[in-house]
Amino acid sequence: MTAAEQLWNRVRDWWSSAARPLVDAFVADGEPIRAYRGYLRLWLSEMSLAEGRRAATDRFPAVQASTRLSFGGSPDTVLSTIVRPAQGQEGPGIHRDIPLTALLPYAGGTVDLQVSLLDVAGQDDLAIALDILGEFSSLLTPPLATVAGVAGKVATGLSRIDNRMDADGQRPVLTLQQSLTAGPAGLQPGYLLAAAATADDLPAGSFTVEKGRLTRTGGGEPVAYLIVRLEVLPERDDWRFPEWDTLIGLANEAQLLGHTERFAQLRADLLSRVVTAPDLTPDDRRRVARLVRDELDGFTLGASGEDRPKTVAGMVETRGLPTAAAVRDLDLAALL
């Protein structure tokens, strides 16, 4: 059993044995997406400890999160992370808008989510969290081909925090396990609220969740809570692919130097990676491959010094992607 699976089982046991949140809600927001037709990303929209804990300046909220979904041909890929306030902003209060996953193609099936709100004390625990964030940072930038190895390191680091909590006799303030399943129209985006509260603390009609923010309308004592946002996009909003950009630069250099054979090798390597990339939907693999191929084959550095874009993001911004219909029958053999 991998470290990620062990962590998943531990949190599942926490959720099963602990008192479940008595107040939870899902607020739909936006249009659904169908499998292989768009992307998803999970955000921590808000997290907060109850007032009694927030008053302690040496204590900080943090969220431990794992997401299980179909990715890269595997139906049960687990991505794990821990998020906390940014350095210099660790004090008491509400903390907002922190990504829990990178932008991922939605390949259908169920998206399972586990989230634990932690009450973190002391610099030692924060140092561990910082170490994990450093290991996890590479997951936030495509390509995600190394996801399994990095996810294992993150899960191992999260287990260190859990062991420390067990040794101190602590449990998460709030643990949530949720399965997000596509309906007839596809996977519905929205906001998931979980609060460590009773119906008396947070009665129905006394709160709203709007754009990821909890608003109390009826007063009452502050409670510990978290809000997770499921974002879905029909088109990527992030085209940063550093590894591909490096190959583009090397191919352009080889072309300028007249190294025809090296250019052909780099071109083939790059296009092969694009058309098999797990980061992209099937249509986008062909669209990006066509765009990159045309840019590589048309690259020149004119006498005026005009320089064509050398990154995928620059190509998309400057030239735009071809339509899905225009590349529907395009395959690797045709590209090469």
Image (cartoon, rainbow, N blue to C red):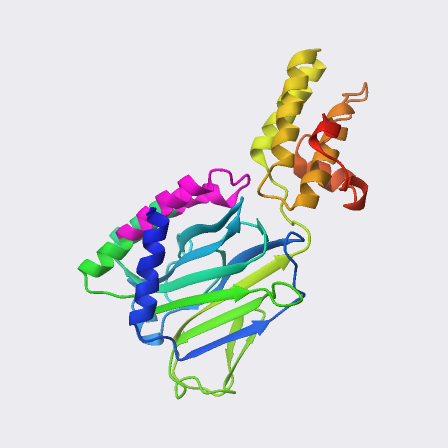
Q: Residue 148: x, y in percent?
A: 43, 42
The vertical placement of 322 against 197, above or below, is: above
Q: Is residue 138 found inside the magenta-colored segment of the image?
A: yes
Question: What quarter of the picture does the C terminus occupy?
Answer: top right
Q: Residue 51: x, y in percent?
A: 35, 75
Give whichever of 284, 252 is nearer the camera: 284
Is residue 107 among the parts visible in the rendering? yes
Total numbered circles? 0
The residue at 34%/46% (across/down) is 2
Q: Which residues are magenta?
A: 133-160
* Quarter-of-image position of residue 271: top right
* Quarter-of-image position of residue 257: top right
The vertical placement of 119 against 307, above or below, is: below
Q: Residue 308: x, y in percent?
A: 75, 29
Is residue 130 among the parts visible in the rendering? no
Q: Is residue 315 left or right of residue 93?
A: right
The vertical placement of 321 against 308, above or below, is: below
The residue at 55%/65% (across/down) is 181
